Amino acid sequence: MSRATAGDRMKRVLSMVPWLVAHPGVAVADAAARFGISEAELLDDLNVVWLVGLPPYTPDNLVDVVIEDGRVWIHYADFFKRPLKLTPPQALALLVSSDGLASVPGADADGALPRALGKLAGALGVDTADRVDVDLGDGDAETLAVLRDAASAGTEVEIDYYSYNRDVETTRRIAPWRVFADAGAWYVDAWCHLAEGERLFRIDRVAATRPTGEASAQRPPADAGEAVFHPDDRHPRVELDLAPDAMWVTEYYPTEAVTPVDGGGARVVLAVTGTAWLERLLVRLGPSVRSIAMVGPVSDGVDLGAVGAEAAARVRARYTSGTTASS
């Protein structure tokens, strides 16, 4: 069995809990069989459930999970009995995000969750039979089909790809492993021969695809989970001294070191995938970057410590020339 992603596991737990509440004392083996997982996986999921609650995390504010003699009981905490007040946008977001739980293997189509979603839809005036469109970016249908077919067949595809990080378009030969949507965009996780490693490509930046029909010798790792960027020794590093209002960088980008500094903020080390990417980041941060130090040389010989100022100067020159021309 392939390793479930965090998102898949969360959907399973959210579908599992209402069913277990409605079937007190069910055998662990029967519950595991219903949701298509092993008993060990079921118990691992339940170890997460009993940590769910509200501050101050006293017993009356935690979901109670009891496992005895191979059977399981779940009792809701007292806070579930309180009326839930939602704004219309919050209610619609909850309805859209929860609707996908019905597709989880083992989910009870007539259980408490579908009934609650039905009541929520009624309160919003939404017909549950209607389709709710979620924008997942501009992934071309033909491109998606080619990459999905290649991932399923284990064959390779040649693509023309625009690299946002380096601001260049390249032709690459890839072995697609997984096509998925995340955070409003479509991605393909693949082995890239040009990079000689695993890479993540945004599908709306794929300008063309050419199936080769040739089987790939590259296979995804057996323990592959969610696709994550893994920098290697070929990627230079930059050290940024961030002001407190720039600490979002540590949550938005993979950092290799975060050291708090006096007066707030932190000194962080980031892998640099391309000079253009770093330029955009530094221009966006502006004075919130108090200092920049190059930890390693970039492949094209550009001094990372100067790219921010140089990019800002180009932007300023462009606006200045535009103002002069129109005056």
Image: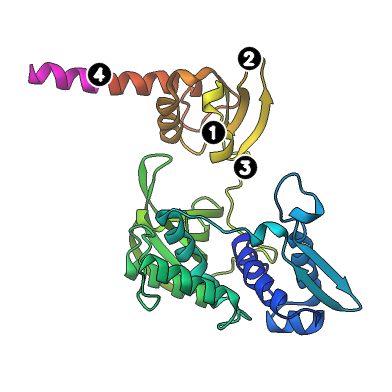
**Of the residues shown, which amino acid type is indicated by label 3?**
Asp
Magenta-highlighted residues: 318-327
**Of the residues shown, which amino acid type is indicated by label 4?**
Ala
Tell which residue pokes out farthest to the left in this image.
Answer: 327
- Of the numbered discs 3 and 4, the one sitting upstream in the chain is 3
- The quarter of the picture where residue 22 lies is bottom right
Q: Main secondary structure of the magenta part?
A: helix
**Of the residues shown, which amino acid type is indicated by label 1?**
Val
Q: Nearer the viewer, mark 3 or mark 2?
A: 2
Residue at the spot x=53%, y=40% of the render?
Answer: 252
- In the rendered image, residue 86, in percent from the top left (x then y), is placed at 48, 55
Q: Report the residue marked by disc 1.
A: 249
How far is the residue under mark 4 from the one under mark 2? Answer: 34 Å
How far is the residue under mark 3 from the one under mark 4? Answer: 35 Å
- In the rendered image, residue 280, in percent from the top left (x then y), is placed at 40, 32
Asked if residue 150 can be seen in this view, the reply is no
How far is the residue under mark 1 from the one under mark 4? Answer: 27 Å
- Of the numbered discs 3 and 2, the one sitting upstream in the chain is 3
Element marked by disc 4: helix
How far is the residue under mark 1 from the one under mark 3? Answer: 20 Å
Residue at the spot x=30%, y=22% of the render?
Answer: 314
Quarter holding the C terminus is: top left
How far is the residue under mark 3 from the one under mark 2? Answer: 33 Å
Q: Report the residue marked by disc 4.
A: 317
The numbered dot on residue 232 is: 3
Element marked by disc 2: loop
Q: Nearer the viewer, mark 4 or mark 2?
A: 2
